[in-house]
Image (cartoon, rainbow, N blue to C red):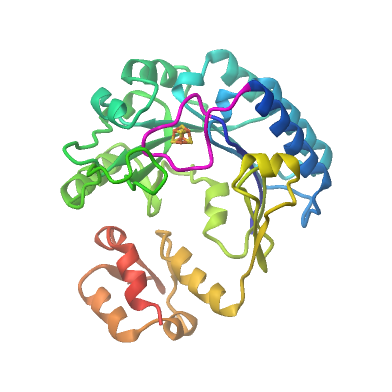
Amino acid sequence: MNKGIYIHIPFCESKCFYCNFVSGQYDEDLIRKYFKSLTFEIVDRKKFFDMLDTIYFGGGTPSSVDVEHIKKIFDVLKDNYDFQNLKEITIEMNPESTTEEKIQFYKELGFNRFSLGIQSFDDKVLKLLGRLAGVEKIFKVLSLFNENDNLSVDFIYGIKGHKLDISPIKNFPVKHISAYILTLEKGSKLFGSELENDDIEEEYYFLLNQLKNFGFKRYEVSNFSKEGFRSLHNLSYWDLSSVYIGYGVSAASYNGVERIKNSDDIKIYIKDYKNDIQKEIIDENKRNVEYLMLGLRKSDGLDYDEKFLNLVNRKELDHFLNEGYLKIENKKISCTDKGFLILNLILEKILV
Ligand code: SF4
């Protein structure tokens, strides 16, 4: 059971064309007001645990704001929580706003995991996606990290007319890789374009092969790590016994019973973080659905037991087992590589 804190920093240097997250370029005045509200929320909101295992600063791009803002939030967390058990403290960064000085500052503060948005090693793709940093800058930033660092990088694949090639990664001390399929949601600049590739099978197996050759093992549908470098914080989102508190605009919390989500509107959030909060009770039915949906995202899968069998359509289950999309090993059921590629379809069919 993990107890984690998520801090949302909704600012970026520019808006990527595929992005519909709660993030954007805002002026200094708004940034100051936002951090004031964020500080207030941390101090004011009722907590449901004290002792922390993980902290995650995500966004947006936390590295795009002045380091003093990050320090202030870190100090407020320290004053309000018990850091004794803290194992993992992550900060998301993007190459255009990452410097040697910033990395050093974060390390001195206590951050011990860095998550860098790379997305591609192809300048044409980076341009297409509206990314600010090109390959040369990405290489420079990657070389600021050393073998002792716990460094994660993100990639995007499934872009029509392109094939992701992560081979330069072998020259850098990367311990963890997240690889996401391009999904253009409403609200993103590229929504409605035909950039999403429906036929990604060849690219998918090419990527899996590269990951394997470079020593990365899958532990979740989109996450791969070297031995001992799974993200504890991310894992907690796929484990219903873990709890987390999210602070900031659009941040979500889960106390084991209820999921609470802050407003997506930064202005509403700044005025009063308690406005426009959405609450969802996770009743037994929802819990069971999530148990299946989250469990099958993980390579470790779920216990193949009575509980599992009572939640699924046996005929559909047999089909996916017989066709090699699911496998049972050591009394656990999980997706095969072939299965992970169609996970949503599997879930849709087996859920009763
Ligand atoms: S850096 Fe990330 S959060 Fe910011 S605009 Fe790009 S994709 Fe969105």
Residue shown at 42%/21% (left/top)? 142
Residue shown at 66%/27% (left/top)? 31
Q: Report which quarter residue 77 is drawn in.
A: top right
Q: Report which quarter residue 298 is drawn in.
A: bottom left
**Looking at the picture, does residue 306 appear above or below residue 273?**
below
Answer whether residue 23 is magenta in the image: yes
Q: Which image quadrant: the N terminus?
A: bottom right
Residue shown at 18%/52% (left/top)? 201
Residue shown at 19%/41% (left/top)? 160
Residue 307 rendering spot, x and y as whole percentages: 49, 82
Q: Report which quarter residue 171 is drawn in.
A: top left
Assign the magenta stretch its main secondary structure: loop
* Residue 109, visible in the rendered structure: no
Question: In the rendered view, does 297 fall on the left or right side of 69?
Answer: left
Residue 267 rendering spot, x and y as whole percentages: 66, 39
Question: In the rendered view, does 229 fall on the left or right side of 212?
Answer: right
Q: Which image quadrant: the C terminus?
A: bottom left
* Residue 209, visible in the rendered structure: yes
**Between residues 134 and 232, which one lies in front from this camera angle?**
134
**Between residues 137 and 233, which one lies in front from this camera angle?**
137
Answer whether residue 219 is magenta in the image: no
Q: Which residues are magenta?
A: 12-27
**Between residues 151 and 55, which one lies in front from this camera angle?**
55
Residue 204 rendering spot, x and y as whole percentages: 23, 48
